[in-house]
Amino acid sequence: MRRREFIAGLGSAAAWPLAARAQQGERMRRVGVLMAFDENDPGPKRWFSGLTQRLAELGWTDGRNMRMEVRWAAGNVDRMRVFAKELVDLQPDVIVAETTPVTAAVQRETRTIPIVVLEVTDPIGSGFVTSLARPGANITGFSNFEPSQAGKWVELLAEIAPGVKRVAAMFSPDTAPYVERYFLPSFEAAARSFKVTSIVAPVHSEAEIESVITSLGREPGGGLMVVPGAFTFAHRGPIILLAARNKVPAIYVASVWARDGGLLSFGADQADTFRRAAPYVDRILRGGKPAELPVQLPTKFELAVNLKTAKAMGLTIPESFLLRADEVIE
């Protein structure tokens, strides 16, 4: 009996080194991630956690079979370019690129390393893919916006603040060069439909942000539409504060704005987009090619309204509007 146990023990001992050698022989994959925003910003931190958690569910754990190299650009285009080169030099198996300017920076550095993009606006017009169904090269991923959304933002703002007579579309040409061709036609058409004056307001600095919002607040009827972009998102604190101080009703593109004190937001659920990106990363790590993975549009949208901000601006939100909202912040 003891002899059989001894032989069985030898078998187990022999099997263990083989399993250990197989595990040790598995190639450690490297994933580069370039986030557009600040690593201390709770919104992007939460979105990024959704990506890593979903990857873990798919069998990829940082430090075990995957090494994740993460860089945070804090809304700065120069840092995006520096970090893009840094990540490409590491020759990762795949790079996750958040936002249009980040994707442009990474694309400038490589046309071969697979890239999964997030929160990209107008991927075809920006030159990242040849079509949504067949991206065609080394880039695929997820676009968060369609051109018609600009019209929806005007519609929602006019509904919640019917006294608005003029609306400024504020954006940074540095981080959102797509705005004029992608969003402005829909914005201007909606403005005409709702009989409000449309104002195009490009900004490059906090001083210019202040100038735009202050001018809107000088007389009644001013409204603000903050167009998506890394610069405006990185400066959302001052934008929200200035809009409140000048009593300018404003609509934003993500619920994090409303949670931070903004009046109203409507846009794709960004946390959901990050989770949906994980299977694309997984497929590429297992041999899939970006050219064969279609670019996807958002499937989940969020409407959020901040009642405290509305009250401070003297706005009464219709009950029907509150019933449609996904999140009412009190």
Image (cartoon, rainbow, N blue to C red):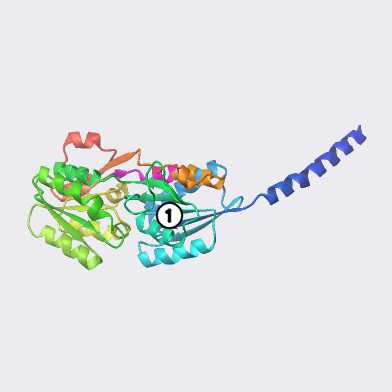
Instruction: Report the side of 152 relative to 175 (left or right).
Output: left
**Residue 328 in view:** no
239 relative to 303, above or below: below
Give coordinates of residue 317: x percent, y percent: 17, 40
Q: Residue at x 85, y 41 (%)?
A: 10
Give coordinates of residue 93: x percent, y percent: 54, 53
Q: Which residues are magenta?
A: 267-276
Q: Residue at x 28, y 48 (%)?
A: 253
Q: Tell me if residue 273 is in the magenta stretch.
A: yes
Q: Residue at x 21, y 57 (%)?
A: 170
Which quadrant is the N terminus positioned in?
top right
Q: Tell me if residue 231 is in the magenta stretch.
A: no
Front position in the image: 206 or 195:
195
**In this figure, which residue is indicated by the disc labeled 1?**
97
Label 1 secondary element = strand
Give coordinates of residue 135: x percent, y percent: 41, 46
Front position in the image: 234 or 258:
234
Give coordinates of residue 329: x percent, y percent: 27, 44
Question: How many other residues sit within 10 Å of disc 1, few (<14), some (14-19) or many (≥20)?
Answer: many
Instruction: Report the side of 150 relative to 283 (left or right).
Output: left
